[in-house]
Image (cartoon, rainbow, N blue to C red):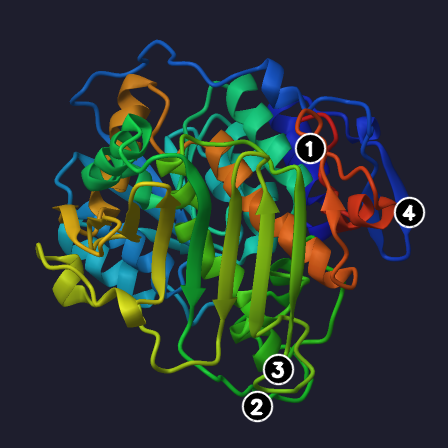
Amino acid sequence: MKRRNFLVSSLLGTVGLNLSSCHSKDSGNSLVVEQDSMKVPEYKSTPLAAGKSVSGSNDKIILSLIGAGGWGSNLALEMSSLNANTEFKYVCDVDDTRGGRVIDELGKIQGYNPERIRDMRRIFDDRDVDAVIIATPTHWHTLASLRAMQAGKDVYLEKCITHNVHEGQQLAHAAAKYDRILQCGLQNRSAAYNGQAAEYVKSGKLGKILNVSVIGFLNGPVPLNEKPEESAPDYIDWDMWLGPAAMAPYSISRNKSWHYYWEYSAGMCMEDGIHQMDLMRYVMGNPGVPRSVSTVGGRFSVDDRREIPDVLNVVYDFRDYTINFQAGEFCRYMIKTSPEIRYSDQFPDWTTNSSKVIIQGTEAMMILGRMGGGWQIYGNEGEMIEQIPGRFPLQDNLRNYLDCIRSRNVPNANIVQGHLSSSMLHYANLSLRLGNHRLEIDPETEFIKNNPEANRIATGHYREGFQLPEIV
C-alpha cells in the first residue's frame, strides 16, 4: 500500500471515514487544520465513561507493539512479565534494525516469536489484535492512535502524548466516540503514594497554596554532532518514518536525535518534563488550562542549530496560584531519582534532585518525587512534619491498562488528563517560539485569544496523505 493512501484506504475500509470532511488549507507541502475559535472541543461533551465489559477476566489479550526502540521494547517486556494472560502477535517498526531483542525475549516468554513487520496497518486490519502499545516518535502518536481506535483497538500511548493542542482534543473525543481504552504513559497516576499526596493537598494542611514549582532538568550540556544528509539506508522506510512531518532528507541525526527537532517532538526537556507536569496536575486536583502562559528561554549552554531550547522558564497563571516550570539540559549536578531510591523506601536528596514538584502553601511545603521517591512535608520552622515513601509505578500503570481492557473502566492515566498535561507544554513552547509572547487562553475553548499565529501552530501541519481528520 502506497504511503499517500495511509489514511484514505485504511480508514475508509474500517470505519467509513470520508476525508473530504477535513477542514484544512493548503500550506506548501503540508495541510494545516483550521480551528473554530468559538467552538468548545467536542471531547468536553463526550466524556469518557466506564463501559460494559466485553470479555471475561481470564480472556487472553492479544497485543502488538508499534515503535520498537529501547523504551517501546521495555514496555512490551514489562507488560509480558505481569503474568496477566497476554501475548504479542506483532512487533512493528519502520527500521529493521530495531525490535530484534524484544522479539527474541517475547518468544522465550510466550513460546513463539511475534512477527516483525514494517507497516502498522497490518495490525489495525487484524481482528485478532485487541490492543497496542504506541511508542513511536511523538509526531506519529495521534495518527497511529486514531487509526488504532477506529479499528477497534485499545491503546497504550507513550509520552509526550501529542504533538500539538488540537491532537489531544481529537484523541480524547475519539476515545469516547469509539469506546476505546486509551491509557497514557504517565505512570505517576497509578502510584499509591501520589494518590495520598493528592489527598493531603486536598485536606488543606498545607494552607492556601499560592505557588507550585515543577522541576525538570536533564543532564547536560549535550553537544549535537550533526551528521550530514544522505540517502536513506535500505533497512528503513524513511517516507513512513516521516509520516505526517514535512518531507526532509535522511540523516542519522534527524533519525536518532529526533527529540531535538520541533517537527517530530515537543522538545527534549518537555518530552521528559511532562511526567512532573502531569504529576503536579494530578496532585493539585487536575486543573484545566491556565489563563495565561509566559515562557523565556533558548539555547544558551550549547549554541548550535538546534531549535529546541536547553534552558526554559515558564509561568502559568491559574488565577488563585501560579505554576513555575523550570527545565534545562545544562547542569550535571542535577540528577534524576536513582533506581536505588525508586525501588526502595528511601527519599532523594531534594537539593540536587532534577525531577520533583514543590507545592508551597501558607502553612507548609510539600516536595514530591516523580516515579518514586515519595514525598515529604516541611513546616514554617523547616521541620519535617510528615513523609510517605513511594516506588516506581510503571508496572502498576501497565497492569491498570490491562485491567481496563477487560473491565472497560476509565484508566488512571486517561487521555483527557494526558491531553491537558501535554497542552501545558505545548502552550509553553508556543510562547517561546513566538518570541516569549505572553499567551492568553480561553479555558472553555482552549483557544489562544491574543495571537492568531499561535493558534495556527497549535493545530499542526500534516503532509499530504497523512492529514489529521477534522471529524474523527
Residue at which label 2 appears: 225
The x, y position of residue 275, in whole percent, is: 40, 51
Judge from the rendering whether residue 206 lies leftward or rightward of residue 28; answer left or right. Answer: left
In 3D space, how far apart are the residues under numbered discs 3 and 2 (Cα atoms)? 17 Å
Marks counted in the figure total: 4
Label 3 with label 2: CB-CB less than 8 Å: no
Q: Residue at x 72, y 75 (%)?
A: 249
Report helix, strand or loop for mark 4: strand
2 or 4: mark nearer the eye: 2
> Farthest residue in the front direction?
381
Q: Which residue in the protein does label 4 denote?
A: 26
Q: Name which residue lies at 90% across and 57% down.
A: 28
**Label 3 vs 2, first from the N-terminus:** 2
The image quadrant where one finds the C terminus is top right
Q: Marks 2 and 1, how far apart in space?
A: 38 Å
Residue 20 vs residue 372, the one in the foreground: 372
Determine the secondary structure under disc 2.
loop
Residue with the mark numbered 3: 300
